[in-house]
Image (cartoon, grey):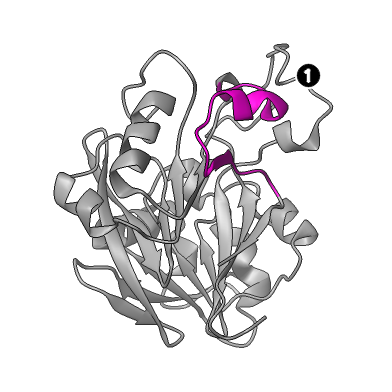
Amino acid sequence: MEPTTLEIEFLGTGTSTGVPMLRCHCPVCLSDDPRDKRLRCSAIVRYQGARLLIDCGPDFRTQMLRASDDNLDAVLITHIHFDHVAGLDDLRAYCFERPMPLYARSDVLRNLHDRIPYCFSEHPYPGVPRFEEHVIGDGPFLVAGVRVEPIPVMHYKLPIVGFRIGPLAYITDAKTIDDKVLDSLKGIPLLVINSLRVGQEHLSHMCLGETLKAIERIKPGKAYLIHMSDRIGLHAESPKLLPQGVELAYDGLIVKV
């Protein structure tokens, strides 16, 4: 891969329940198409020699066992919800030689200290994962030499962050995005953005109509949808719903830009 090329590998593209959802027997959950099997949302971004994990949910171990490359240099966390942080304990395999750099908002780091205190204790039990904490503020920051710009969005009433990395903007769990933020992303080559389902609106997530309005405002070179439930419909039928340049992402998909 050329050093100027960005690669994103989608480890998971599903919402918090995953797809298939337990006890659901709809056509999507019963589908044989592997693109309709969605683990919880996470991705690896590889750019300028750095390998950055975005979110670390409950499916992290399974995702990394089947990833094309299991090396990581740092972890970026969008917010504290379980489906985005529950796999942090499985990072212990990455912490044998040094603590794993972990980038998150200050409120997220405080919450993690309460949830997994053994990872942050002064005298840790041997073998637990150890983290080098970095607070995400309002401005850009460097991760393994790569410039990362936080993208502020609202997950209902919870302020969370997406990430702009080179030609990529990655946004998950957004319900509302400020007009200034949308304008700042105009024309970005690659947009990854959440879209929970078709039809009825949701309290804290954009659904397809809202997502397509945001995409129309940003006008990216290409857009991929993530954080999808079974009610987004069958992957094979999605081209009927989507404008040109917009596609459903799927687990294992690798996109280069």
Q: Position of residue 49 (x, y in %)?
A: 57, 85
Q: Quadrant of the N terminus?
A: bottom right
Image coords of residue 79 (percent x, y): 36, 51
In this picture, is 103 found above or below 170?
A: below
Q: Position of residue 31 (x, y in %)?
A: 79, 23
Identify which residue is drawn at 33% across, 62% down.
109
Q: Which kind of residue does numbered mark 1 sit on? A: Leu
Residue 128 lies in what quarter of the image? Answer: bottom right
User: Is disc 1 surrounded by few (<14), some (14 to 19) or many (20+) residues within 10 Å?
Assistant: some
Is 243 magenta? The answer is yes
Residue 34 in the figure: left or right of residue 145: right
Residue 30 shows up from this direction:
yes
| For residue 222, side relative to residue 202 (left or right) | right
The residue that mark 1 highlights is: 30
- Residue at point 50% right, 33% down? 243
Q: Residue furthest front?
A: 244
Q: Is residue 174 visible?
A: no
Boundaries of the magenta span: 232-251
Give the answer, above or below, for where 191 lies relative to 118: above
Which of the pair 225/80 is nearer the observer?
A: 225
The residue lying toward the viewer, choosing from 255 and 153, is 255
* Residue 58 within the magenta-colored segment of the rendering: no
Residue 187 is situated, as x and y percent measured from the top left of the image, at 34, 58
**Residue 243 in the image: above or below residue 166:** above
Element marked by disc 1:
loop
Quadrant assignment for the C terminus: bottom right
Q: Report the front residue among 15 and 233.
A: 233
Q: Residue at x 21, y 35 (%)?
A: 157
